[in-house]
Image (cartoon, rainbow, N blue to C red):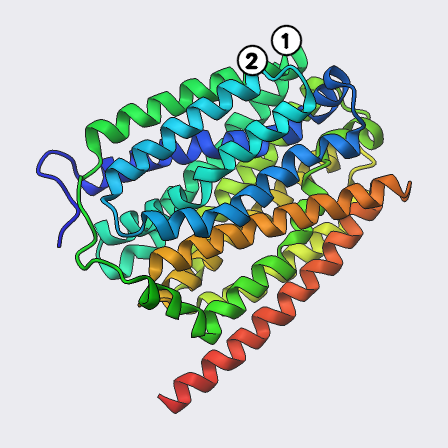
Amino acid sequence: MSLTSSHFSPRTVIAVLMICAFSIGTTEYVVTGVLTHIAGDLHVTIASAGLVVSMYALGVAVFGPLMTTVSVKLPRKPMLLLFMVLFIGSNIVSATAPNFSVLLVSRVASAFMHGPFFALAFVMASELVEPRKRVHAIAAVNGGLTIAIMIGVPFGAYLGSLIEWRLVFWLIALLGLAGLIGLLICAPNTKPAETPRIKQELSVFKHKQVLLTIAIIIFGYSGVFTAYTFIEPLLRSVTGFGGVGIMISLFFFGMGSVIGNFSTPRLAGGNVTKTLIYVFTILTVILLLFPLATQYAVTAVFIIGLFGAGAFGTTPLLQSKIVMAAKEGPTIAAAASVSAFNLANAAGAYLGGVILDANLGYSWLAICGAAISVIGILLSALSYHKEKKEQKLA
């Protein structure tokens, strides 16, 4: 059953999904650029302000699979529209939050829609195109998130520093409204070709490659967020940057993210897992160089750009790997991957907060991140070994 409409091409639909991903990506990551301002305005510590990141991530991880399980049998367009309405409302609450507790609640409310939205968007995008282009279609939707990191996050950080952090959430709500209108006009109003059975969808978790990919994300990717969550106070304290320096640094991180997101699927060719091992290795080296490079302005900006490329060069590979391995239930598997990424986010942010509370210093954030990335290399190598073994038996 084709998901394309007679009026809009697959490219147009994917572009609209990218706009939605851009707004969702901005709200997820922009707080890392305004943590200092949130902490000051709402009278909490920097480590406590990091809960704004980890609680959002935990909300995605916990509610993502549940919401996806509920929505998987329903027409995709109404569900996507409902999720965007929830997104807009929760960001308005964030913008008007009178205290830190309300801000945390609004972040969790926004997290409700994150997992199922991306799960449906990834599957819709992959079904819009022929099989050989599915990795690129998923990367395109995920590209909206990485473009948000390149443009939305540094601009939001600068705006929050220059004027008011609450204004950032108002602008995100407007972005969400634009995405909502685009979906209303362009998204095809169809159900899956076959009504999914929950038991069949959940059977994907019997696949070793699905479970291994989830493990790689949770135990190998969380090191990215140990360093990234506190990048704004790190740049202020270690590099001595102000608002403009932080904006430029975050822009380079985002630019690296976009390059990594779109280049690694092309480099992967037919071997996603082998490419994943290489990218994780590069990421580990970058994190080890972090403490030295962030001492100086020029090298700090350069290493942060490389960090973005390494961090988000892995994401389309991992997302594609899990969707392709889960033929019986790609929607549930995609939701599980989003949840796993956000568990990694929450774990990394929490670990970073523990490091800072223990007064170990910002350098240890990257060192611990590198150690965690080594786990990603080992698990990816194990996955590659099992893939080769399965191919021989087939």
Residue in the foreground of this view, choosing between 299 and 202: 202
User: Dot 1 surroundings within 10 Å: few (below 14), some, or many (20 or more)?
Assistant: few
Indicate the quadrant where residue 270 lies. Answer: bottom left
- Residue ranking furthest to the left: 6
At 38% from the left edge and 49% from the top edge, which residue is drawn?
68
Relative to 77, 111 lies left or right: right
- The residue under label 1 is 163
Counting from the top left corner in percent of width and height, residue 132 is at 27, 61
- The residue under label 2 is 167
Amino acid type, mark 1: Ile
- Residue ranking furthest to the bottom: 393
Indicate which label's residue lies in the foreground, 2 or 1.
2
From mark 2 to mark 1, how far is it between C-alphas? 8 Å
At 65% from the left edge and 53% from the top edge, which residue is drawn?
222
Counting from the top left corner in percent of width and height, residue 149 is at 54, 34
At 43% from the left edge and 38% from the top edge, which residue is drawn?
113
At 38% from the left edge and 57% from the top edge, which residue is drawn?
332
Relative to 189, 266 lies left or right: right
For the N terminus, the quadrant is bottom left
